[in-house]
Amino acid sequence: MKASMVLNRLSRRRVLRGMLEGGAVTLGLPLLDCFLNGNGTAMASGEPIPVRFGTWFWGLGMDARVFVPKTLGAHYDLPEEIAALAPVRDHLNLYTNFNALRDAAQNLCHYTGWVILRTGMAPASEDDRPGQTIDVTISRQIGRTTRFPQLTATADGDVRNTFSYENANTPNSAEWSPLNFYTRLFGPDFQDPNASSFTPNPRVMLRKGILSALMDQTQAVVKAVGSEDRARLQQYFTGLRDLEHEFDQQLTKPEPIAACRPPAATQADPPAGLETTLVAERHRMMTDLLVMAVACDQTRVFNMAYSTASASTAKAGYEKPHHTTTHEEAVDAALGYQPTASWFLRRSMESWAYFVQAFGGIKEGDGTLLDNLLIYGSTDHAWARIHSLEGIPMFTAGRAGGRVKSGLHIDGAATPATRLGYTMMKLFGVELGSWGTQSNQTSKAISEMLA
């Protein structure tokens, strides 16, 4: 048979099937050139390389005097506080002079700002928990065909440090241990898409069978309770359906992925502590695992937090953590800013640069993994010393499969910061006429960033 005739009958999902000692076995095909189009930008079938979405968080904002570039557009200058971003500047957009608007609500320190940026609403109190955050909204659009609808991690060692919420009652807990994160991602339940054989995990098959049997009874239970309980049950059963979908993914042979190279097993967690070198080490380890989880199509939506909102990172030999320093350190008369507070902020920007570089180091198609994703970088305040929300800085990294321009400094002209969230959700196909509440409501995209 001619080679061209064989290739016409192949697809990336094609497997060889047979029997081994009475059991069915399959052999997946590697990522062949014939599965791609002529220039490696999509599958031969026309299916595009998937575009992913992520978030990255740092606490305590910035000092505009040494953070905000003096020039706009491409090739913007890099003041002292963001000098570490030089290797990745062309992959980043920096958004300044945007405002998080609280209307009649009080300014809840280290809380109001990030909630507005990630949900579009200003919380009325600290008990006013965030509704669905932007990562979850986008995950429901693009993340339901992978093993994990979203992954959330933190570098500060606190599992409670999450900026991702399914709803007001359901935060997505952050993974804090590189060792546990490795086991979760690449442990016994991981199915290597490039493995020569595939054997469904019998434990997963059993779990799915039990869950499927229970799901058949859900409607009868829903009909038997009152309206409030019905709403709670619907929310609970939605979670169970998501779990069942995750089981389905684990029982299906994954497609081969050239960029997927499962890392060596993590041997131990870094020492506990919030000293900046320990946080940076933990951040690096969690980043490397997260990057390969995305490359192996374990997830298409992810979150990473460098610190808490009221960052408590510490400097060796210095008696105060970052948060306390922002309030108590005097402004140096010669420099014009708080030198130690700025030292802390520069360490977070170093980790942000590492995060972006790590995705840019994975080849995918005719570009890199970074070309096929968009990362949203956000914080809790503009100038932490006074807890300001005016001029709150934001970043994006990546080009979202060619949909976004990069390497730009964009001035928001004091418009709502929610414009960036609105623009990103529209880019990922979320149908919405506007986003946000009260003064944060917007239907105006940031056109300068769109390709």
Image (cartoon, rainbow, N blue to C red):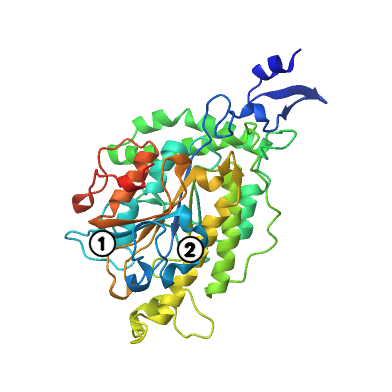
Say if 257 sits above or below 186 in the image: above
Q: Is residue 67 visible in this depiction of the protein?
A: yes
Q: In which quadrant is the N terminus drawn? A: top right
Name the kind of residue labelled 1 in the image.
Ser
| 150 sits to left or right of 165 | right
Residues at badges 1 and 2 in contact (C-beta under 8 Å)?
no
- In the rendering, at what x and y percent does residue 215 appear? 48, 31
Distance in Å between CA atoms under marks 1 and 2: 35 Å
Pointer 2: what residue?
85
At horizontal 53% and vertical 26% (from top left) the residue drawn is 46
Name the kind of residue labelled 2 in the image.
Leu
Question: Residue 228 falls in which quadrant of the image?
Answer: top left
| 60 sits to left or right of 16 | left
Closest to the observer, 138 or 352: 352
Judged from the image, the secondary structure of the residue bearing numbered disc 2 is: helix
- In the rendering, at what x and y percent does residue 335 appear? 37, 83
Judged from the image, the secondary structure of the residue bearing numbered disc 1 is: loop
- In the rendering, at what x and y percent does residue 207 appear? 59, 37
Give the mark, 1 or 2, whose residue is nearer the N terminus. Answer: 2
Closest to the observer, 12 or 437: 12
Closest to the observer, 194 or 106: 194
- Numbered mark located on residue 125 in the image: 1
Give the label, 1 or 2, closer to the camera. 2
At horizontal 27% and vertical 64% (from top left) the residue drawn is 389
